[in-house]
Image (cartoon, rainbow, N blue to C red):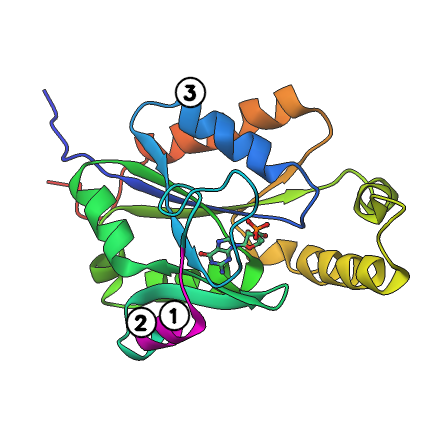
């Protein structure tokens, strides 16, 4: 029999807000064995119902900056005016447990991780396979309608939201995989198939 060491997957999922990526990622974590979320750090305040250490590690600006200076982040970025980042230690500890890790992060963070994973010391960031997936809306109008959201939001808030979504969408071609989220069930099946294929890939180092 051929016995290969387990190859944990690091799965980066990006896409504009409102595109439905959290629903897809939540389902991956729920239905795929040994698949967990990476819990990010952020300087934004917790929303109602969010618990420190569950949705995010909520850090002060000073604490976040201290950890950036200490080189503790695998990636970090400013999103909607707040800082967000993934601690290298979070990834390391999940890899040791043999978990596949799903990261719902923005396009800037994904670009940082992608270049770190292409560097010679990639295994110090993540010892397994890396893949990134962009989730796009079927049409711009559909996304824009969703982002226009509540009537109570001011025009400037809505304009900023739309600008940011447009900027994120413009970067879809940097990703290895593109899923157009037309129908939730189809999109989930496609995402699950990508992960299955990646977990079966014969990689450098696997060969005798
Ligand atoms: P929210 O504050 O609504 O939970 O997340 C806002 C945005 O921040 C989402 O688009 C999400 O993808 C992004 N985000 C969450 N965690 C991280 C992270 O650790 N790094 C980066 N670069 N972006 C993140």
| Relative side of 139 to 53, left or right | right
Please provide percent x and percent y for residue 122: 27, 61
Using the image, tell me which numbered label, if any, was put on residue 35. Answer: none
Secondary structure state at the residue bearing disc 3: helix
User: Which residues are drawn in magenta?
Assistant: 58-66
Using the image, tell me which numbered label, if any, was put on residue 67. Answer: 2
Q: Check if mark 1's residue and mark 2's residue have beta carbons within 8 Å.
A: yes
- Which quadrant is the N terminus positioned in? top left
Q: Nearer the viewer, mark 1 or mark 3?
A: 1
- Could you tell me how far apart the alpha carbons at marks 3 and 2 are, in whole angstroms? 33 Å
- Residue 165: which quarter of the image? bottom right
Residue at point 84%, 44% (across, down): 150
Question: Label 3, on which residue?
Answer: 31
- Could you tell me how far apart the alpha carbons at marks 1 and 3 are, in whole angstroms? 33 Å
Looking at the image, is 14 positioned above or below residue 157?
A: above
Question: Label 1, on which residue?
Answer: 64
Secondary structure state at the residue bearing disc 1: helix
């Amino acid at each position: 029999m051929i016995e290969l060491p387990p190859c944990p997957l690091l799965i980066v999922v990006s896409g504009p807000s409102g595109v439905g990526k959290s629903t897809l990622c939540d389902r991956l974590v729920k239905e795929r064995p040994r698949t967990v979320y990476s819990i990010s750090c952020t300087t934004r305040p917790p929303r109602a119902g969010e618990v420190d250490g569950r949705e995010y590690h909520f850090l002060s600006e000073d604490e976040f900056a201290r950890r950036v200076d200490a080189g503790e982040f695998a990636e970090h970025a400013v999103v909607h005016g707040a800082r967000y980042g993934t601690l290298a230690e979070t990834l390391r500890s999940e890899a040791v447990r043999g978990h596949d890790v799903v990261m719902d992060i923005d396009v800037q963070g994904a670009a940082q991780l992608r270049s770190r994973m292409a560097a010679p010391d990639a295994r110090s960031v993540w010892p397994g396979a890396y893949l990134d997936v962009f989730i796009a809306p079927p049409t711009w109008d559909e996304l824009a309608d969703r982002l226009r959201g509540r009537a109570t939001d001011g025009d400037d808030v809505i304009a900023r939201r739309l600008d940011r979504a447009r900027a994120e969408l413009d970067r879809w071609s940097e990703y290895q995989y593109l899923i157009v989220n037309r129908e939730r069930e189809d999109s989930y099946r496609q995402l699950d198939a990508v992960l299955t294929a990646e977990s079966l890939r014969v990689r450098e180092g696997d060969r005798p």
